């Protein structure tokens, strides 16, 4: 559902802006507010789930997400829609923060890669459905139904969740309100400041917000080292496998999602495709990734996660370098074929890297680390948006870049040529980011993620009370 909601809103931008008589910069916040809230809350939500129960927090998140979806469908103005998307994002944060922890609860290390492979498949299926449903629902029923469709699905999912997951694994400990507040504040300042930088250009205000957020990192680390039950147990990051896997995840998100954004802008702005037609060219990659991910997860279980995560980044890097050769008349068939290369990369990377992240984490910190993983991934997504809009605004006016991004405007003549040059440049920049992610992935201790034999019964190891 989270994946569907990301792509489905992107395709409805022009219709929402026209229906609510709102500027595109306001409607764009329907995506940005979701990413901002999820980025700020997921680590704290994960830690809360360690204490209250992973299943309980996940189910609560699904309830809030479903209610927020209904409110979004009923929103009378663009401002209220953005606010209700924030409500929806609170539920989404509780869902995605606990998903990895729940899998770690229920699957032993010997088969976790396969489990993460199925969640990767689900994410790719959701992205594909979002593209198709976004076009169909917006065209034939209206944009409000892209949110209303979540309500019946959410009701069924909540019923299943409470029946199957229940309260879930929990530990006896206390919350760390000071640490949670410091972490939430510094993330909010950093994310909002950088997003405003992309939306409005550099200013004293957004630069001050970013500087203030960065300045809170020191106090947060100081507090977490001294409190007996921290939000983030910093000692966990002595594990080279964990720390480098998390950083590789951030860089992969920053590098790869920028590629998707730039590719869509190229197809809409230079090639003149509609948002739906542009998104359809990415479907072959999603489909291949969906089918391959469970098998790739099984390979990670059998042969070690780090090598397959690194191989996945190598495929993404190869696809990005191919995208960097795009011209104004490049065949659409070739673009779809390149998406297959990056699709293979995603199928190999995501389940393998998730398995590596959770390898050295003790059960009492599953939720916190699961949430941190999602915080870094979503922060990378926001960084992708900031980077793409910033680079695009160097070639064309910022308002034109927004129109190209949302599919409501195109480019002509020398402006198109200048934009194409910027597009190719940003692909090379993203290739460097992915190269760094691959280097981190490859530098993890050889054998530190070695396959763990399953117990005779195939059950997970005993949980702590």
Image: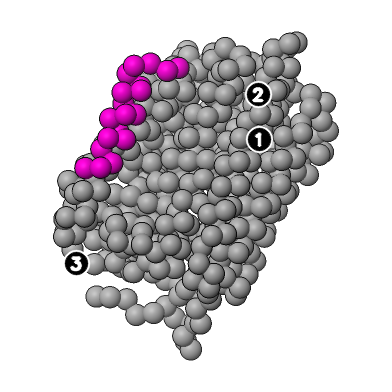
* Sequence-wise first label, 2 or 3: 3
Question: Residue at the location (35% across, 33% down)?
Answer: 190
> Which sits earlier in the primary sequence, circle 1 or circle 2?
2
Q: Position of residue 125 (x, y in %)?
A: 61, 50
Which mark is drawn over residue 428? Answer: 1
Eyeballing the image, is 234 above or below 405?
below
Q: Which residue is mark 2?
A: 422
Local packing at callout 2 (Cα closer than 10 Å; few below 14, some 14-19, many 20+) is some
- Name the residue nearer the viewer: 164 or 188: 188
Disc marking residue 172: 3
Magenta stretch: residue 62 in it? no
**Residue 215 x %, y %:** 27, 35
Say which quarter of the image contains residue 89: top left
Horizontal side of residue 243 vs 124, given as left or right: left
Circle nearer the viewer, 3 or 1: 1
Residue depicted at x 23% and y 61%:
51
- Can you tell which quarter of the image residue 55 is in? bottom left
């Amino acid at each position: 559902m989270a994946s569907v909601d990301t792509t489905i809103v992107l395709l409805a931008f022009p219709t929402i802006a026209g229906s609510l008589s709102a500027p595109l910069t306001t409607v764009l916040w329907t995506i940005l507010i979701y990413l901002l809230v999820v980025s700020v809350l997921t680590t704290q939500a994960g830690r809360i789930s360690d204490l209250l129960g992973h299943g309980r927090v996940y189910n609560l998140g699904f309830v809030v997400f479903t209610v927020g979806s209904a409110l979004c469908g009923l929103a009378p103005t663009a401002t209220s829609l953005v606010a209700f998307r924030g409500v929806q994002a609170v539920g989404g944060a509780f869902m995605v923060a606990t998903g990895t922890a729940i899998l770690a609860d229920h699957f032993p290390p010997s088969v976790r890669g396969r489990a993460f492979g199925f969640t990767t498949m689900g994410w790719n299926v959701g992205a594909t459905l979002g593209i198709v449903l976004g076009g169909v629902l917006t065209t034939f029923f209206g944009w409000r139904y892209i949110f209303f469709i979540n309500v019946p699905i959410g009701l069924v999912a909540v019923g299943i969740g409470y029946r199957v997951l229940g309260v879930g694994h929990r530990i006896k400990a206390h919350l760390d309100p000071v640490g949670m507040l410091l972490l939430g504040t510094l993330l909010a300042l950093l994310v909002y400041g950088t997003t405003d930088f992309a939306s409005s250009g550099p200013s004293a205000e957004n630069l001050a917000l970013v500087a203030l957020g960065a300045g809170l990192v020191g106090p947060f680390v100081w507090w977490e080292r001294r409190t007996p039950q921290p939000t983030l147990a910093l000692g966990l990051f002595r594990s080279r496998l964990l720390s480098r896997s998390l950083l590789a995840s951030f860089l992969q998100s920053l590098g790869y999602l920028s590629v998707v954004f730039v590719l869509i802008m190229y197809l809409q702005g230079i090639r003149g495709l509609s948002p739906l037609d542009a998104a359809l060219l990415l479907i072959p990659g999603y489909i291949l990734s969906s089918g391959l991910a469970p098998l790739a997860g099984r390979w990670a279980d059998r042969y070690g996660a780090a090598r397959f995560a690194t191989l996945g980044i190598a495929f993404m890097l190869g696809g990005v370098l191919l995208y960097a050769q795009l011209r104004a008349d490049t065949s659409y068939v070739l673009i779809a074929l390149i998406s297959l290369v990056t699709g293979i990369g995603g199928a190999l990377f995501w389940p393998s890297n998730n398995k590596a992240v959770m390898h050295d984490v003790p059960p009492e910190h599953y939720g916190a680390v699961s949430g941190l993983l999602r915080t870094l991934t979503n922060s990378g997504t926001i960084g992708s948006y900031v980077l793409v809009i910033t680079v695009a605004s160097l070639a064309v006016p910022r308002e034109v870049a927004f129109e190209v991004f949302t599919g409501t405007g195109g480019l002509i003549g020398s402006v198109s040529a200048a934009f194409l040059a910027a597009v190719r440049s940003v692909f090379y920049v993203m290739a460097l980011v992915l190269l760094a992610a691959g280097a981190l992935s490859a530098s993890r201790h050889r054998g530190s993620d070695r396959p763990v034999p399953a117990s005779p019964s195939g059950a997970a190891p005993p949980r702590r009370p």
